[in-house]
């Protein structure tokens, strides 16, 4: 879900003792659509997901090997989209997933407490708060993403997406 190039570099002046990367899907949507272009029609599925990716690092100052350990976290929210199609033979294929960074993020640091394996309560709380905020606004994010990224592609291709009749 997240390329390692998206993870922030280590800050100067610290030695990283341990690094734990995380990626968690917090909301997902599969929206069926019928695509029509002239006499042709096919079934599509607009797949979207919101996820949080990031890392927790256990560090110590580079200049002082005896210094107490600390931990730092950095989490980022992302939206992923992909369009899938079902052929008349029943085969299911999807476009390459596209991922965009959202403005939602959390970062911080704290002294490392005792325990083995070490616990990261503030990092876990920050990730949970970020995930909850993203999940709460998932329908709005998915709708805005569809209008801004997917529907223009369909219009440019001359495809209409009639809504199913209400029952």
Image (cartoon, grey):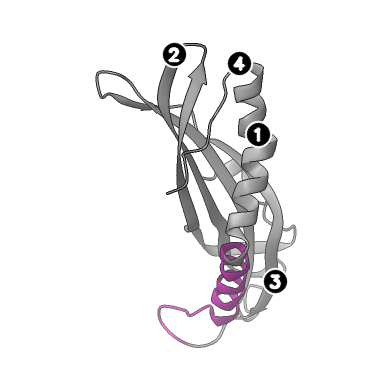
Tag shown at residue 149: 1
> Given contact means CB atoms under 8 Å apart, are the residues at marks 2 and 4 in contact?
no
Find the distance from the CA under tag 4 to the CA under tag 3.
Answer: 45 Å
Label located before the other in sequence (1 or 3): 3
Part of the protein shown in magenta? 115-135
Nearer mark to the viewer, of 4 and 3: 4
Find the distance from the CA under tag 1 to the CA under tag 2.
Answer: 23 Å
Report which residue position mark 3 lands on.
Answer: 108
Report which residue position mark 4 lands on.
Answer: 157
Find the distance from the CA under tag 1 to the CA under tag 4.
Answer: 13 Å
Counting from the top left corner in percent of width and height, residue 12 is at 75, 57
Which residue is found at the position 24% from the left and 18% from the top? 89
Label 4: how many residues lie within 10 Å, few (<14), some (14-19) or many (20+)? few
Q: Nearer the viewer, residue 58 or 30?
A: 30
Label located before the other in sequence (3 or 2): 2
> Given contact means CB atoms under 8 Å apart, are the residues at marks 4 and 3 in contact?
no
Find the distance from the CA under tag 1 to the CA under tag 3.
Answer: 32 Å
Q: What type of secondary structure mainly makes up the magenta span?
A: helix
Find the distance from the CA under tag 3 to the CA under tag 2.
Answer: 53 Å
> Given contact means CB atoms under 8 Å apart, are the residues at marks 1 and 4 in contact?
no
Report which residue position mark 2 lands on.
Answer: 40
Label located before the other in sequence (2 or 4): 2
Magenta stretch holds residue 131 = yes
Counting from the top left corner in percent of width and height, residue 25 is at 47, 56
């Amino acid at each position: 879900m997240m390329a390692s190039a998206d993870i922030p570099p280590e800050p100067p002046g610290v030695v990283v003792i341990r690094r734990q990367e995380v990626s968690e899907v917090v909301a997902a949507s599969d929206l069926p659509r019928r695509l029509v272009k002239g006499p042709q029609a096919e079934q599509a599925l607009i797949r979207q997901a919101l996820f949080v990716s990031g890392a927790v690092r256990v560090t110590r100052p580079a200049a002082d090997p005896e210094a107490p350990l600390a931990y730092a976290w950095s989490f980022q929210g992302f939206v992923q989209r992909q369009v899938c199609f079902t052929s008349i033979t029943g085969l299911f294929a999807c476009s390459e997933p596209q991922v965009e960074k959202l403005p939602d993020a959390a970062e911080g640091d704290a002294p490392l407490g005792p325990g083995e394996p070490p616990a990261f309560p503030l990092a876990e709380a920050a990730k949970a708060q970020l995930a909850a905020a993203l999940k709460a606004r998932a329908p709005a994010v998915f709708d805005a993403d569809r209008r801004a990224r997917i529907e223009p592609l369909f219009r440019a291709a001359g495809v209409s997406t009639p809504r199913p009749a209400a029952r």
